[in-house]
């Protein structure tokens, strides 16, 4: 049948099973929005308050559902406003398709009104991108974009379409989406044999889990693998929930704000099995001293990650789930009683602690866990609150924590919470923010109220940029340059002005009844929690130090004595 380019875009989205799109219209993309108008009963469009919010919402939707998130933007500033969200998705390997419109083909390259070479701008931060100059190529390009976004190591793909291409007409034939076929040829017998030998020879194995284990839906296989080799498990920020955070074998997050048990344990192990993690500097600390006593076995779908940051003794290139399935068939049941006992001692000796006399971030996270029975979906911004959300909420399943790990994007969480809630409407979704982060994109509260998306926004309000202040306290002689937010912004009034319910919490005993009420209302809620400006995230590894040089508040006090 003969369709316009805009109609083809909508039909291709329907082919791919897209039910929700986040975006913001403008002149160049008007044809697409006009076509979307005819299909409002099939594809819901969420008009965000800013294009950056749309990109983060598409990202949150993808993380929550495992499907491809989709966002729309017009040319020029509309397209460039997606850039931070695209980069966030790229760093965390999240499948997003961003569809932008541009000026007509004849106007490209002429500095036309609202023209930007968005394909050129986003080349370093997309898995692939396209500019479609012929309507005959449009359908196949969109299909390729979705396939690329979700195959192999997932990531964002941008499709830029000149306005005249959205208006031109060509023949369209509906197609079933191409099934994802994982290449298992890279999982060789030699690599598996080497891995099995290393595992069976190890006396002190440790497993480090990253976001790749979640992307490959490998949780069930991971659980069997852990039980089979009898090893403790640590995770990266991106790997939270891949392995049950309440398991006795779980030791917590590793790295700069990881637990002492994980940091000391990984330093002491003789074999570190790394599943879908890329050895970020925040994980490894001083790379030359990382896991210095261990052989390293790295399992990753992306061969570019092997030996990139940390040298390995062996590797298996392949999808985590597929690799674990084969290892579970080959590895004999192991028993490491003494090693597990040692790790248990570390956990008992070095638990996560905090000051219990006042309202704090850790207290709030533990209360959220208690009140929601650990079932809530948690999104975060970036900073101290993000680390407390990682440390003090036990994630029992994958796709439960959504946070900007690689790029560290302040302003990510609120948009992501909208996407997560749209993808999993029956679940409680709570965004954790600092007051500095909340200011970045707090206009998306208006989006939540426009569509009555009942997310709960909790602000850890300490009137400072908390994580930066922590570094200024510890490493910059308490010179608080431009990190104090002493002003009269009232988040409760702001919430109410945008149509949400607002609360202010100043004491510990006030938090639980307010959160319970917020959950019961099923409307957008903002809870302003007043915490101390000098609360810190402990433990911590100083920049450039080895992870076993981790210290906490008690260690600092002892050094002063």
Image (cartoon, rainbow, N blue to C red):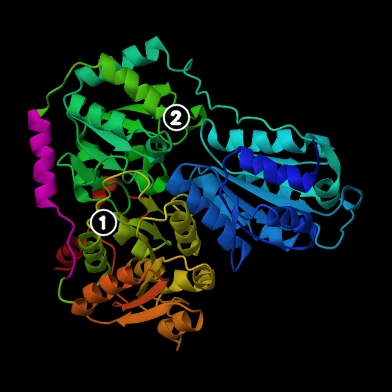
Magenta residues, dominant SS class:
helix
Does label 2 or label 1 sit earlier along the sequence?
2
Q: Is residue 116 visible?
A: no
Quick check: can you spot residue 253? yes
Q: Which residue is mark 2?
A: 307
Task: Look at 73% across and 58% down and name the residue there.
Answer: 74
The picture quadrant where one finds residue 216 is top left
Name the residue tied to disc 1: 393
Determine whether label 2 and label 1 are within 8 Å by CB: no
Dot 2 crowding, Cα within 10 Å, few <14, some 14–19, many 20+:
some
Q: Is residue 205 above or below residue 431?
A: above
For image coordinates 31% across by 55% down, the residue present is 390
x and y percentages locating residue 537 in the rendered image: 29, 63
Question: What crowding class fits label 1: few (fewer than 14 Cα within 10 Å), some (14-19), or many (20 or more)?
Answer: many
Direction from residue 166 to residue 240 in the image, left or right: left
Q: Which residues are magenta?
A: 337-355
Distance in Å between CA atoms under marks 2 and 1: 32 Å
């Amino acid at each position: 049948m003969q369709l316009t380019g805009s109609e083809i875009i909508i039909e291709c989205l329907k082919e791919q099973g897209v039910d929700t799109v986040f975006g913001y219209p403008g002149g160049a993309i008007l044809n697409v929005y006009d076509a979307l108008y005819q299909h409002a009963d099939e594809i819901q469009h969420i008009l965000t308050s800013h294009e950056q919010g749309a990109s983060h919402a598409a990202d949150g939707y993808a993380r929550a559902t495992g499907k491809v998130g989709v966002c729309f933007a017009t040319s020029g500033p509309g397209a460039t406003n997606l850039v931070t969200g695209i980069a966030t998705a790229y760093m965390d390997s999240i499948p997003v398709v961003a569809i932008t419109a541009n000026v007509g083909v004849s106007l490209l390259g002429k500095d036309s009104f609202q023209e930007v070479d968005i394909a050129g701008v986003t080349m370093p931060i997309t898995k692939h991108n396209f500019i479609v100059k012929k309507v005959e190529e449009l359908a196949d390009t969109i299909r390729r974009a979705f396939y690329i976004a979700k195959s192999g190591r997932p990531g964002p793909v941008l499709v830029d379409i000149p306005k005249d291409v959205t208006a031109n007409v060509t023949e369209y034939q509906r197609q079933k989406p191409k099934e994802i076929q994982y290449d298992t040829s890279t999982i060789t017998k030699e690599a598996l044999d080497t891995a099995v030998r290393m595992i069976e020879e190890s006396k002190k194995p440790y497993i480090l889990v990253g976001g790749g284990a979640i992307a490959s839906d490998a949780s069930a296989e991971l659980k069997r693998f852990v039980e089979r080799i009898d090893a403790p498990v640590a995770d990266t920020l991106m790997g939270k929930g891949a392995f049950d955070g309440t398991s006795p074998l779980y030791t917590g997050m590793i790295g700069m704000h990881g637990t002492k048990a994980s940091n000391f344990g990984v330093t002491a192990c003789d074999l570190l099995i790394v599943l879908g993690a890329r050895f970020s500097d925040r994980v490894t600390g001083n790379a030359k001293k990382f896991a210095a006593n261990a052989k390293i076995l790295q399992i990753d779908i992306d061969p570019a990650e092997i030996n990139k940051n940390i040298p390995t003794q062996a590797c298996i290139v392949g999808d985590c789930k597929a690799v674990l399935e084969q290892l579970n068939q080959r590895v004999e049941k192991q028993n490491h009683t003494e090693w597990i006992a040692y790790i248990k001692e570390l956990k008992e000796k070095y638990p996560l602690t905090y000051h219990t006399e006042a309202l704090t971030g850790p207290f709030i996270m533990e209360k959220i866990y208690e009140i929601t029975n650990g079932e809530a979906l948690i999104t975060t911004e970036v900073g101290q609150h993000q680390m407390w959300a990682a440390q003090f909420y036990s994630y029992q399943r994958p796709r439960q924590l959504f946070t900007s790990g690689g790029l560290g994007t302040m302003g990510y969480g609120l948009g992501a919470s909208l996407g997560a809630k749209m993808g999993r409407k029956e679940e409680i979704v709570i965004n954790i923010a600092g007051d500095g982060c909340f200011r970045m994109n707090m206009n998306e509260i208006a989006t939540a109220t426009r569509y009555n998306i009942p997310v709960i926004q909790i602000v850890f309000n300490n009137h400072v940029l908390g994580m930066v202040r922590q570094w200024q306290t510890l490493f910059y002689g308490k010179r608080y340059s431009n990190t104090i937010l002493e002003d009269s912004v009232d988040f409760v009034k702001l919430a109410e002005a945008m149509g949400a319910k607002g609360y202010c919490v100043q004491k510990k005993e006030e938090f639980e009844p307010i959160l319970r009420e917020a959950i019961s209302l099923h409307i957008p809620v903002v809870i302003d929690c007043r915490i101390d400006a000098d609360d810190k995230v402990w433990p911590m590894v100083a920049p450039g130090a080895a992870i076993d040089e981790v210290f906490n508040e008690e260690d600092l006090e002892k050094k002063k004595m």
